[in-house]
Amino acid sequence: MRSLILVCGSVVLSWGCAAVPAASHGTLSQLSVVNGPQAEFCAHRVPAESCTRCHPELEARFKKAGDWCGPHGVPESQCFPCHPDLSFEPLPVLASHADLRILVEGGEDVPSLQPHLVPDKVTVFEFYADWCAVCRKVDRHVYARLNQRPDVAYRKLNVVSWESPLARHYLADAPGLPLLVVYDKQGREVATLSGGDTGALDRAITQAGAR
Ligand SMILES: [Zn+2]
Ligand SMILES: [Zn+2]
């Protein structure tokens, strides 16, 4: 499902991340995340201690946290049909020099990304949503990168849903989440990437940092 689309002179790389509709979906809460390598997994490929199919009494906790997939009757954070890229590992702890900021939390529009570029750094904007497992996978990768590269600024924008003002402005042509826009240190757009190909993101960051 690889495709290459040219949009307004910038390259949009897409690798088939499904556009998951937000309706009837919940938040990927931290309730299914496990700490430490000794976690045991049940037959549902979910951490045994938090699986609601093995432990139905846990359902209420997940529903209360908004972490519930109505169509499949399991927590959003345990729903492989909706999120084949689910992972139960916690995000890496960020070092003090890691440059991460959440620009938008509620899907409100941002007229332009330009004022949010960080001078003399590579700036990566990530349009994401709490129900997007691929976004979390990308975050896990990028957080580790940020710890190694203080010259990379990561700016996160929560679109909340495909219908939010932010999504309508920036995601009209995006095949799926996350949408990542990479700028070099001079503020020139280097790449727009959609989906979870962290290798392509690394190459874009390297390219942006070398310019
Ligand atoms: Zn189970
Ligand atoms: Zn589901």
Image (cartoon, rainbow, N blue to C red):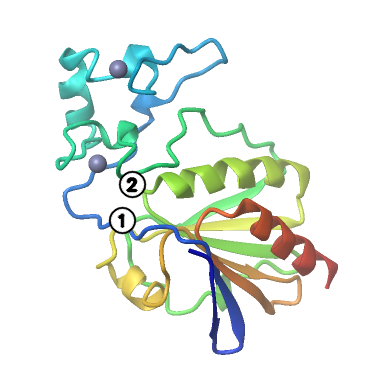
**89 w.r.t. 160: above or below:** above
Q: Nearer the viewer, residue 203 or 65?
A: 203
Q: Which residue is mark 1?
A: 20
Of the residues tagged 1 and 2, which is closer to the observer? 1
Question: Which image quadrant for residue 128?
Answer: bottom left
In-image side of 137 versus 129 (left or right): right
What residue would you read off at disc 2? 131
Q: Residue furthest right?
A: 210
Q: Nearer the viewer, residue 115 or 9?
A: 9
On-image quarter of the C terminus = bottom right
Quadrant hosting residue 68: top left
Q: Amino acid at mark 2?
A: Trp
Q: Is residue 149 left or right of residue 136?
A: right
Q: Which of these two is toward me, 8 or 94?
A: 8
Of helix, strand and loop, which one carries label 1?
loop
The three-letter amino acid code for the residue at tag 1 is Val
Up-down relation of residue 98 to residue 170 (above or below): above
Within-10-Å neighbours for mark 1: few <14, some 14–19, many 20+: some
Residue under the point 59% across and 50% down: 100
Q: What percent of the width, then of the height, locates residue 160?
A: 31, 56
Query: Image check: 145 left or right of 124?
Result: right
Are there few (<14), some (14-19), or many (20+) residues within 10 Å of tag 2? Answer: many
Picture coordinates of residue 166 (x, y %)? 35, 70
* Above or below 200: residue 119: below
Q: Do callouts 1 and 2 mark residues in contact (Cβ within 8 Å)? A: yes
Q: CA distance from mark 1 to mark 2?
A: 9 Å
Which secondary structure lies at badge 2?
Answer: loop
Mark 1 or mark 2, earlier in chain: 1
State the image coordinates of residue 16 (x, y, percent, origin top left). Answer: 46, 61
Q: Is residue 63 left or right of residue 166?
A: left
